[in-house]
Structure formats: C-alpha cells, structure tokens
Amino acid sequence: QQDGAPPHWSRQVRQFLNETLPNRWIGRKGADDLALFSWPPRSPDLTPCDFFLWGFIKDTVYVPPLPQNLDDLKNRIRTSITSVTPDMLCRVWQEFEYRCDIVRVAGGGHIEHL
C-alpha cells in the first residue's frame, strides 16, 4: 500500500515498484507510473492496522486490572500482538478484500463507514 505519504511518493520508490511490480502495486501514482489503481487518500477503512489491529490491541490491553506502569503496559501490548493468530490474519485479509471490492464498485469514490 502506497498511501501518498512523502517517503512512499519518492521517485526512487515508484521506480522500484514500476520495475518490480508493474501493474500490481496500489498507490498514489504519477502519469508514468504502472500502479494497478490509485490508493484513495485518507482511507482508514482500507488500512488493516486501522480497521483491525489498533482496536484489537486496545480491547485486549485495557481490561481490568488496568496496567499500573509503563512496563506493564508494554508487556500487555506485546502479549496482545503475539496473540494474533494466523486464522485472525486470514479473516482480516478477507475483510480487506471485501473493502477493496466496495471501493472498486464505488469507482474509487466516497464510501460510507463500513
């Protein structure tokens, strides 16, 4: 995912993607780029960290008894991340594909919250 952030938009990055993944990368593109389609700007509904991971971590870290110090918080975050199973990742990928289909049907335009 190339979301148009300056580090992702450099000529070197786009040249690498055009050579390595012609017509297979998704992102902000210039006139000569070989992206499959443009990545919609400000698209948290299409970002797995936004639509899955951050909420999952929050829901598993902030349960009583709440963390009492920074080390406890860091340990809970590590435990939460390592508890993500391959099955969960498969479901996230399926959800991502579904969300991309909705954007394609909408022609890349605005979609309501999913």
Image (cartoon, rainbow, N blue to C red):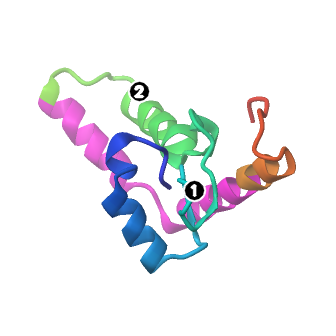
- Identify the element where label 1 is drawn: loop
Q: Which residue is mark 1?
A: 31
Magenta stretch: includes residue 22: no
Q: Nearer the viewer, residue 10 or 108?
A: 10
Q: Earlier in the sequence, mark 2 or mark 1?
A: 1
Q: Main secondary structure of the magenta part?
A: helix
* Amino acid, disc 2: Val
Q: Nearer the viewer, residue 35 or 105?
A: 35
Q: Is residue 101 above or below residue 111?
A: below
- Point out the residue furthest to the front here: 31
The residues colored magenta run 71-98
Magenta stretch: includes residue 87: yes
Q: Which residue is mark 2?
A: 63
- Point out the residue furthest to the right here: 105
Quadrant of the rendered image containing residue 82: bottom left
Q: Residue at x 49, y 45 (%)?
A: 3
Q: Residues at badges 2 and 1 in contact (C-beta under 8 Å)? A: no
* x and y percentages locating residue 80 in the rendered image: 36, 46
For the residues labelled 2 and 1, the Cα–Cα distance comes to 49 Å
Quadrant of the snapshot with the C terminus: top right
Q: Is residue 80 above or below residue 22?
A: above
Q: 42 left or right of 95?
A: left
Counting every numbered tag in the picture gives 2
* Amino acid, disc 1: Ala
* x and y percentages locating residue 103 in the rendered image: 76, 47
Q: Nearer the viewer, residue 54 or 1?
A: 1
Q: 52 left or right of 13?
A: right
* x and y percentages locating residue 50 in the rendered image: 52, 38
* x and y percentages locating residue 19 in the rendered image: 44, 78
Q: Residue at x 21, y 41 (%)?
A: 75
Q: Residue at x 38, y 51 (%)?
A: 8
